[in-house]
Image: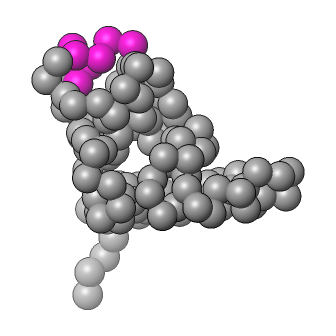
Amino acid sequence: MKFHLPVVLYDPDCPLCLRFKQGLEHLDRNLTFVSARDPAVYLELPELDPELCLEKVHLVTVDRTVLAGPEVVDYLVRTLPGVSKLAWLLDNDQGKRVKEFFYQKVEELRELSKKKDANCGTCSKG
């Protein structure tokens, strides 16, 4: 296999995705980060859908389980050294709601960022 698992797929054209990647790189050197825009990923990991991988973060575990969106957050909280010590904060209903709210807000910011970038060519610069 070309990619060392676990693999996190991210959108390199998204500023929030790049920040997420950079932050995780400091926390865990065992994660492999691959552009969701790289066609080679889908040849190596045919279980992935290219369109879905650009819509939300995806992670493929060592046993090739595909996680998406908030499931990736759960996995990272359980497995990242240092972060896993705080996993108990998310183990109740209130913690799950906070995590889902946070993830939803990040997704909203990502969508706004994509719209802003798409419209940038038409904005007036003066």
Left or right placement of residue 31 versus residue 57 in this view: left
Q: Nearer the viewer, residue 13 or 5?
A: 5
Q: Residue at x 35, y 61 (%)?
A: 27
- Residue at x 22%, y 16% (from the top left corner): 44
Which part of the image, by quadrant, shows the C terminus? Answer: bottom left
Q: Is residue 72 magenta?
A: no
How far across and how far down the image is residue 11, in percent? 32, 46
Identify the coloring.
one colour
- Indicate the position of residue 67 as horizontal and vertical percent values: 51, 30
Whole-percent x and y of residue 79?
48, 46
Q: Does any portion of residue 119 appear in the rendered image? A: no
Residue 43 magenta: yes
Q: Which residues are magenta?
A: 41-47
Given residues 91 and 95, the one toward you in this image is 91
Visible residue check, residue 62: yes
Which quadrant is the N terminus positioned in?
top left
Q: What residue is rendered at 30% in x and 64% in y?
A: 26
* Picture layout, residue 73 above or below residue 19: above
Camera-side residue of 74 and 70? 74
Residue 123 found in image quarter: bottom left
Percent x, y for residue 8? 35, 40
Is residue 93 depicted above or below 72 in this figure? below
Q: Nearer the viewer, residue 37 or 68?
A: 68
For this orientation, the residue located farthest to the right is: 93
**Residue 94 falls in which quadrant of the image?**
bottom right
Asked which quadrant contains residue 105, the reply is bottom right
Left-right relation of 81 to 27: right
Residue pictured at 28% horizontal, 45% vertical: 30
Q: Is residue 47 above or below residue 102?
A: above
Task: Tell me if 83 is positioned left or right of 18 in this view.
Answer: right
Total marks shown come to: 0
